[in-house]
């Protein structure tokens, strides 16, 4: 379900201090019935068990294939346009306690590079000729209350000039009508099939019991 930007900006996540110059492009929520405040790692494990990025539905794989073809044609994805080329990784901005929270990227087909992981949030980054983007996954109290928690995804971007802004505007309908609904079906299924049985929450004050990370 699409959420207002404030559903991300009003949460006390660490990303606000790391990327204050990135704009919040999209915020989406994913239902995780029965999840407690300490179940964010359970949800991430469920997503990996379900196949991760590589298990995208055919229509989403098709859209990404088209995007990669266009990137190859116009040079958007050349190494010099990516992290360490046109832009530097945000790892250089991380405080000491965030620098060593991730290891090497897992071979799941994702184009994103892990930035940091905490008990309540996880961030990955991607840069190319169109812009510098962050995918922020956070754990927050569900809108319906009742003490349950839900997964929230925010996409933060710094477009590459006017072209980057135009590109983001052009692909917005595909994100909202195809990609995010497909992610919703996939990630909510992952929770039902791989996560719910392992969920136990945690008591307030226990390690990983808040969405602050």
Image: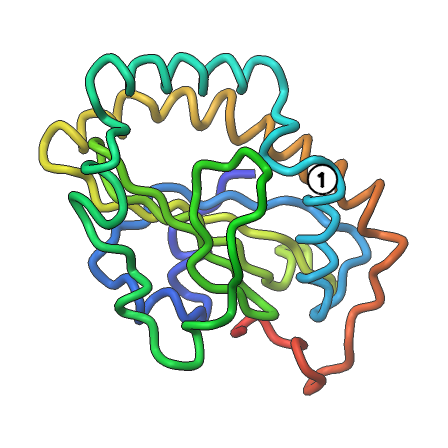
Q: For the point 37% across and 19% down, which residue is it?
A: 68
On the image, the x and y values in percent for residue 172 come to 35, 26
How many numbered circles does the render carry? Answer: 1
From the viewer's perspective, is residue 8 above or below residue 125? below
Q: For the point 32% across and 44% down, which residue is it?
A: 133
* Quarter placement of the N terminus: top right
Q: Which residue is mark 1?
A: 188
- In this view, the residue in front, 1 or 154, is 154
- In this view, the residue in front, 40 or 173, is 40
Please identify the quarter of the rendering in which residue 94 is found: bottom left
Q: Is residue 57 left or right of residue 33?
A: left
Please identify the quarter of the rendering in which residue 88 is found: bottom left
Looking at the image, the residue that sits furthest to the bottom is 205
Colour pattern: rainbow
Q: Is residue 185 left or right of residue 181?
A: right
- In this view, the residue in front, 62 or 103, is 103
Q: For the point 83% across and 61% down, which residue is it?
A: 199
* Quarter placement of the C terminus: bottom right
């Amino acid at each position: 379900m699409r959420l207002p930007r404030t559903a991300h900006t009003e949460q006390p996540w660490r990303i606000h201090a790391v990327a204050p110059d990135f704009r919040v492009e999209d915020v989406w929520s994913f239902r995780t019935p029965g999840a407690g405040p300490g179940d964010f790692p359970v949800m991430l494990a469920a997503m990996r068990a379900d196949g991760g990025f590589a298990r995208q539905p055919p229509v989403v794989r098709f859209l990404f294939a088209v995007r990669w073809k266009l990137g190859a044609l116009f040079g958007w994805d050349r190494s010099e346009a990516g992290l360490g080329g046109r832009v530097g990784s945000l790892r250089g901005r991380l405080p000491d306690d965030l620098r060593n929270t991730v290891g090497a990227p897992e071979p799941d087909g994702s184009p994103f590079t892990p930035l940091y992981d905490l008990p309540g949030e996880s961030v990955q980054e991607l840069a190319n000729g169109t812009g510098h983007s962050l995918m922020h996954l956070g754990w927050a109290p569900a809108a319906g209350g009742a003490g349950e928690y839900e997964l929230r995804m925010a996409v933060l971007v710094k477009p590459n000039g006017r072209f980057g802004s135009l590109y983001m505007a052009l692909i917005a309908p595909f994100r909202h009508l195809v990609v995010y609904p497909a992610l919703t079906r996939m990630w909510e299924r992952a929770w039902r099939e791989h996560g719910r049985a392992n969920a136990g929450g945690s008591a307030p004050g226990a390690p990983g019991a808040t969405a602050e990370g």
